[in-house]
Amino acid sequence: YQSSFQAAFSSVHNSNKIRNATHGSNGIHSTVRVSSPLLGGGGRGFPLSLAIRIAAEESMLWKDTNDLVNGEAICKNDTHNEVIAFGIPDLSTAESLVCAMDEIDVC
């Protein structure tokens, strides 16, 4: 997860630097969302509970260097906010991820 988050957000940073260098900064702030699947989310016999735990731990590790706003991990910089969004269509699985993140955050 960590290398994926870094790669996704660094590509946004690089494109913004190029755009601002050629067009100038207009002072508008935006939110950049990087979506991620729940890796190993029950597929091919991988335990769903372990996939949830790994995603929670990696998200909270990423959050440790960022802020948390309205339940979303946000990294504030001069041009945009960064948000990690997990694509989890099953509500009970999504709730399990939120609970796992809450448990880690309490520690």
Image (cartoon, rainbow, N blue to C red):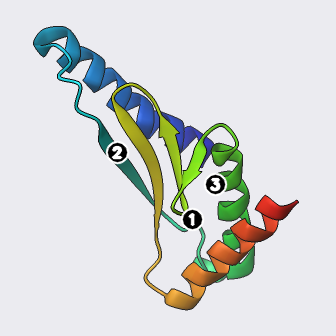
Query: What amino acid type is highlighted by mark number 2?
Result: Val
Q: Position of residue 44 (x, y in %)?
A: 60, 79
Percent x, y of residue 19: 18, 19
Mark toward the start of the polypeptide (2 vs 3): 2
Sequence-earlier tag: 2 or 1 = 2
Dot 1, crowdedness within 10 Å: few (<14), some or many (≥20)? some
Q: Name the residue rendered at 16%, 13% in the picture.
A: 24
> Where, by quadrant of the figure, is residue 65 drawn?
top right
User: Callout 1, which amino acid?
Assistant: Leu
**What residue is pinned by disc 1?**
39
Alpha carbons under labels 2 and 1: distance apart: 21 Å
Q: Is residue 53 visible?
A: yes
- The type of residue carrying mark 3 is Ser
Which residue, given by chain and number where applicable, does mark 2 sit on?
Answer: 32
Binning the other alpha carbons within 10 Å of mark 2 as few (below 14), some (14 to 19) or many (20 upward) gives some
Whichever of callouts 1 and 3 sits on the residue coming sooner in the sequence is 1
Circle 3: element type: helix
